[in-house]
Image (cartoon, helix red, strand yellow):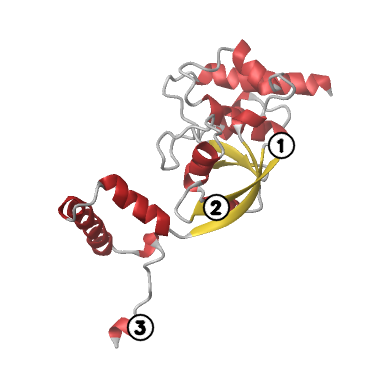
């Protein structure tokens, strides 16, 4: 009787208890260890899982091009961009919404694509770093990054550019403090923050003077 009244939390990881999580993780580990015993290669087992995985067809517009993609319900947007659409400019860093390397613009807002399920992107407009340049010309913020030595190792640069682009679309001439606030969710392991802020401020000043 108690089990019938117990809320079903199997579809909501945030509501699952630690015990339930560990039990499910243990089951997965047990299955993985059983693969060699059953005489099945790991690659074959993975292939079998993928062939039976639930898939959903989504349609989204990326950098102005419309795409129809069959995605597994567990895939994230960054996986679809990189693995299905070959848009590898978007990077996977922490893979848990902490570093900002995977930032893209979805319907005008910067989002961490590592934390967006692909099915959530159905019907959306997405811009990646590949979509910033036009006609062989860098966007104003890209050009400003070059002139101010914004990229160092370059791994975080795509995410920085996308967040900066979203900022400039809403605030054409941000000051340094506004840029810092907007970019707070984008980490630079090279600690090149001063140059990045200067680049975004420059891009804003140029766009403001051109109006």
- Extreme residue toward the right, this view: 211
Disc 1 from disc 2: Cα separation: 33 Å
Say whether residue 206 is left or right of residue 1.
right
Q: Secondary structure at mark 1?
A: helix
**Chain-order first, disc 1 or disc 2:** 2
- Quadrant of the drawing holding the N terminus: bottom left
Disc 3 from disc 1: Cα separation: 48 Å
Q: Position of residue 23 (x, y in %)?
A: 23, 62
Above or below: residue 101 compared with residue 22: above
Disc 3 from disc 2: Cα separation: 37 Å
Q: Residue at x 41, y 65 (%)?
A: 11
Read off the residue under disc 2: 70
Q: Secondary structure at mark 2?
A: strand
Quadrant of the rendered image containing residue 52: bottom left
- In the depicted view, which residue is nearer to us: 186 or 20? 20
Read off the residue under disc 1: 170
Q: Secondary structure at mark 3?
A: helix
């Amino acid at each position: 009787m108690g089990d019938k009244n117990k809320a079903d939390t199997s579809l909501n990881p945030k509501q699952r208890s630690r015990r339930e999580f560990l039990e499910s993780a243990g089951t997965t580990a047990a299955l993985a260890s059983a693969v060699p015993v059953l005489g099945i290669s790991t690659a074959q087992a993975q292939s079998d899982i993928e062939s039976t995985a639930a898939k959903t067809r989504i349609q989204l517009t990326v950098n102005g091009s419309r795409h129809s993609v069959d995605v597994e319900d567990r895939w994230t947007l960054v996986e679809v961009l990189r693995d299905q659409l070959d848009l590898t400019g978007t990077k996977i860093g922490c893979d848990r919404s902490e570093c900002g390397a995977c930032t893209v613009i979805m319907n005008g807002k910067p989002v961490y694509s590592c934390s967006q399920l692909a099915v959530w992107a159905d019907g959306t407009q997405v811009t990646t770093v590949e979509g910033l340049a036009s006609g062989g010309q860098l966007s104003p913020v890209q050009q400003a990054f070059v002139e101010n030595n914004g990229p160092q190792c370059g791994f975080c640069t795509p995410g920085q550019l996308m967040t900066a682009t979203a900022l400039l679309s809403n605030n054409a001439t941000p000051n340094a403090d506004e840029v810092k606030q907007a970019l707070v969710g984008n980490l630079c392991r090279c600690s090149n923050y001063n140059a990045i802020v200067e680049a975004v401020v420059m891009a804003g000043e140029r766009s403001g003077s051109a109006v």
